[in-house]
Image: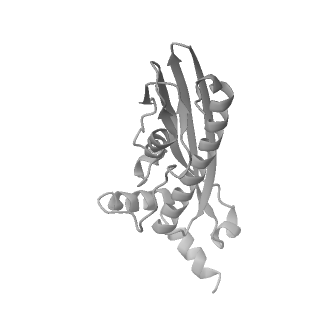
Amino acid sequence: MTAASPAMTKTRRIPRWSVVALLLAAACATPPTRAYPEIGFAHLPPIRLAVGRIEVVERYRPPGTAPNIDHRLAQPPVAVMRRWAAQRLAAAGGDGVARAIIDDASILEEPVQQSPGLTGLLSVEQSERYTARLAMTIEVDAPGGRGNANAVAERSVTVLEDATLAEIEDAWFRLVESSAGDLDRELEANIRRHLGLFVVQ
């Protein structure tokens, strides 16, 4: 390959974010490029709390506009976090209530700075960074007392500028799956540490 060919391609390339936006807009009416397994927690034992019911409160509202892209995923973080509450928390009985509060479930897209000059023109570099931030608070309000535990999980992934839509979707799936796993481990540890009084063994 000569130096002229990639240089010409680079100078003609329209901004990556607009390409991704067009691809995703076209994909809105169609399923993802491949089927992904459900990100779930049913394989883990439930955390049983001495309450009569469990409620899910969604404080986070996806803005639906850039730089957020979480609303575009087949399994957006907010849906995975609702599933976490349904599969990991169980009401063991009592007069109290436990609330799983979704404080954040965002994924932000930002451009990665390209190498200047000829180096940037002649190389395929990382183009976008996607950062997921999942935050949840568990509150217990029961006759025997009140308490809360929270956790935050944050991860980032970058994709190459020539990544296909399928490769981008794969990166998004892995990002949500790994972030949800981080959140699960931290939440369970903090629930047992700070809400141990309400945990039924």
Q: Residue 57: name its quadrant.
A: top left
Q: Residue 146: name its quadrant.
A: top right
Say whether residue 52 is left or right of residue 49.
left
Q: Name the residue nearer the viewer: 122 or 81.
A: 81
Q: Name the residue nearer the viewer: 116 or 179.
A: 179
Q: Residue 116: name its quadrant.
A: bottom right
Say whether residue 189 is left or right of residue 61.
right
What residue do we see at 69% from left, 65% from top?
Answer: 117
Whether 190 is drawn above or below 96: the answer is below
The image shows residue 124 at horizontal and vertical percentages of: 63, 70
Say whether residue 40 is left or right of residue 119.
left
Whether 103 is drawn above or below 28: the answer is above
From the image, which quarter does the C terminus lie in?
A: top right
The image shows residue 5 at horizontal and vertical percentages of: 58, 81
The image shows residue 177 at horizontal and vertical percentages of: 55, 53
From the image, which quarter does the N terminus lie in?
A: bottom right
Q: Name the colouring of the figure.
A: one colour
Residue positioned most to the bottom: 1
What residue do we see at 54% from left, 51% from top?
Answer: 176
Q: Name the residue nearer the viewer: 61 or 26.
A: 61
Q: Name the residue nearer the viewer: 31 or 100.
A: 100
The image shows residue 185 at horizontal and vertical percentages of: 64, 43
What residue do we see at 48% from left, 35% from top?
Answer: 90
